[in-house]
Amino acid sequence: MVRRLAFSGALLLLAALSSCLEFDGQDVTWVFDAERDRLDVQLVDRGFYVGEESQLFGPPKPGFDSTDEMLGRLLGGERIVALLQSWPFAFPLDDITKEGLETDAEGKPKDLIAATLASHITVRRGDFFRDAKGRVCAWQHVRVKGLAECLAMGDALLRREFADEKCTADFRKWFGLEDEESLVRWQAAMKEKRRWLSHRGSALEFHVPASDEAARRFLERLEAAGRKRADDGAKPTDFEEFAEGARRVGLQVSVDAEGLLFSIGDPEKSQHELNYSPPNDEPHHDVTPLLEKRNVVIRTDVTDETLKQLFAEFRRS
């Protein structure tokens, strides 16, 4: 499955970020600044709560301890960014930089590319506040400097992973790209070091080599998965979950000269907004006591207009 594709180096230390600090949804606003070669992002996490953690014996229990630990890291200034999902799926950028620069037995950095990529990202933590629905929320401002170089490093990381035959085989199998023509196109893309990642306007693009026939079949599967998910209440398959997630974030999938093109955002605009709020029936436990214990003031004067002004100020900085 695609979401199980993981970089072997420091880029994904997600498992180490065990925490029950969760949120219900996220508002994402991003701007590609071509003149300054950077990406500015505002993340507004909506509806913080303490989730539950599994026990070796007995039922799950509220994860107050791990949530408190994560709050300590965030309030202490660590660069931790979560995209769309809650904190167990966050990117611990300081950890990625530190571990990537650690040396191996030969005195070489373990993952210089990932460490360098993480060092291009700055994070400015905003305040906690209650929104119009009374939910505990917070915002972050994220800046990716040297965007062209970062996309090139992202390409290098993908090529490194796809150099592993099993990783490539699993990826191509999941996408249904196992025909001979797809293999030829894939090998050519690897040999010629073609781009996997790019952007146009506010659209971020991911290119996947595929034959015309395989790309067409993928689009048919995607459409069928969307219909099936809407028609029955059975437990969704991995692909059906992907289709539903793609719909929620506005992911566009099309066919181009090289194969499949995945894009999110509008290439005609410099700024894009995404409101991600999936269904969530998990038990919610109040995070407020943990914030109060750390003397965190939860503001009540933050509105949507306030957030727009804050992002505008950040972009001017």
Image (cartoon, helix red, strand yellow):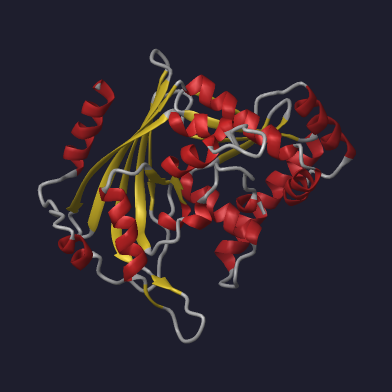
The answer to whether residue 10 is left or right of residue 165 is: left
Q: Is residue 182 visible?
A: yes
Q: Position of residue 141 (x, y in %)?
A: 30, 36
Asked where in the image residue 21 lies, by quadrant, the reply is bottom left
Depth check: give the residue in front, 167 or 271. Answer: 167
Q: Position of residue 223 (x, y in %)?
A: 64, 51
Quadrant in which the C terminus is drawn: top left
The answer to whether residue 267 is left or right of residue 20 is: right
Q: Is residue 86 visible?
A: no
Q: What is the total number of numbered labels drawn onto the structure image? A: 0
For this orientation, the residue located farthest to the left is 301
What's the residue at 45%, 61% (across, down)? 18
What's the residue at 60%, 52% (across, down)? 3
For this orientation, the residue located farthest to the top is 35
Q: Position of residue 78 (x, y in %)?
A: 34, 44
Quadrant in which the N terminus is drawn: bottom right
- 40 versus 75 height, above or below: above
Asked where in the image residue 192 lies, by quadrant, the reply is top right
Q: Position of residue 205 (x, y in %)?
A: 57, 31
The answer to whether residue 30 is left or right of residue 97 is: left
Depth check: give the residue in front, 281 or 217. Answer: 281
Depth check: give the residue in front, 70 or 134. Answer: 70
The answer to whether residue 55 is left or right of residue 61 is: right
For this orientation, the residue located farthest to the right is 180
What's the residue at 15%, 45% (across, down)? 302
Depth check: give the residue in front, 308 or 313. Answer: 313
- 43 versus 227 height, above or below: above
What's the residue at 10%, 47% (across, down)? 301
